[in-house]
Image (tube, grey):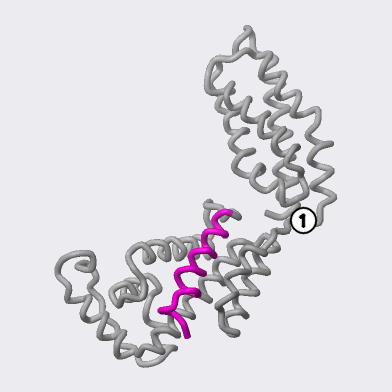
Amino acid sequence: MRKEDLLANLEAVEDSARKLKNEIQQIEGENLYRQSTKIAVRQLCNKWFEEIDPVLARFGVSDETKKKYHDFFSSLLELAIKTSRKATYVKIIGQILSTLRDDLFLIVSKSAGQTVSTAHLAKILENATEEEKDYLNEALGCAGSGFFRASVVLGWSAAVHRMHKTIEKLGFDEFKKKSEEMKNVTEGRFKRFNKSFSVNSLSELEATVFDKDMLWVLEYWGLIDANQHERLSLCFTMRNNSAHPGEAPITEENLASFYSDLKIIVFDNPKFRL
């Protein structure tokens, strides 16, 4: 998320909170029963927890301030899932509005923008070839600037390059043989795989064999086991999500898991050593 996007989200939260406060004050009675208003409160809290809270630290917001608003919106959410007093809603929303600009707008506006430490991710370079490091250094640069989706796409490309080079090293004929054997399996884990591949060069492999199919052949070949296959499939899904528009965010935690799996299962794996 860019700094401009975070500021726009903060503006939207402030505007919604102010409107909700005015609306709640005008409702008759001591308790808030109106479902439409309670739903609006929950939507406001969800926006905070899904779009704002996870990125605040990257823009210079302290843990103490982050916790302060986390507690405010947690309390507000708890009110909205039951019947609660109007005065309590008004009090909490008022506390949010009274300090939001001083606490967050100024800090975010003054920040240099989203920067992320990539020191822990850079461990993936330990067993990378020079050619792979070109991809991976660019991928880490994207991560450090907050472009997580681009980082995932480049990181996966580097891992696939290692798998392709390993197949080239072990022999395209052997890859063809394993795929044909697996196609003929009629029971067990591989019984639904109905493809075989005849490739004679790296460029042919890249152009004609989908990554998900390659993973199945690698498992049958014994270069990865079923659990490693599943983890790499999750990495591939993250790559596909990153390469196409969608609502699923890529978080720092996702990125850390992604690079950890690629490092351990591919780049550090003796079976993929070049």
Residue occupying image coordinates x 47% and y 86%: 274
Label 1 CA crowd tier, 10 Å (few <14, some 14–19, many 20+): some
Farthest bottom residue? Answer: 200
Q: Which picture quadrant has residue 168? A: bottom left
Q: Secondary structure at mark 1?
A: loop
From what the image shows, is residue 217 above or below residue 246? below
How many numbered circles does the render carry? Answer: 1
- Tell me residue 203's x, y (percent): 44, 88
Is residue 101 toward the left or the right of residue 71 in the image?
A: right
In the rendered image, residue 264 lying in the magenta stretch gets the answer: yes
- Tell me residue 239's x, y (percent): 50, 65
From what the image shows, is residue 80 above or below residue 44? above
Is residue 40 toward the left or the right of residue 1 in the image?
A: left
Image quadrant where one finds the N terminus: bottom right
Is residue 231 toward the left or the right of residue 60 in the image?
A: left
Residue occupying image coordinates x 70% and y 15%: 25
Is residue 217 toward the left or the right of residue 252 in the image?
A: left
Magenta residues (range): 253-274
Q: Which residue is mark 1?
A: 113
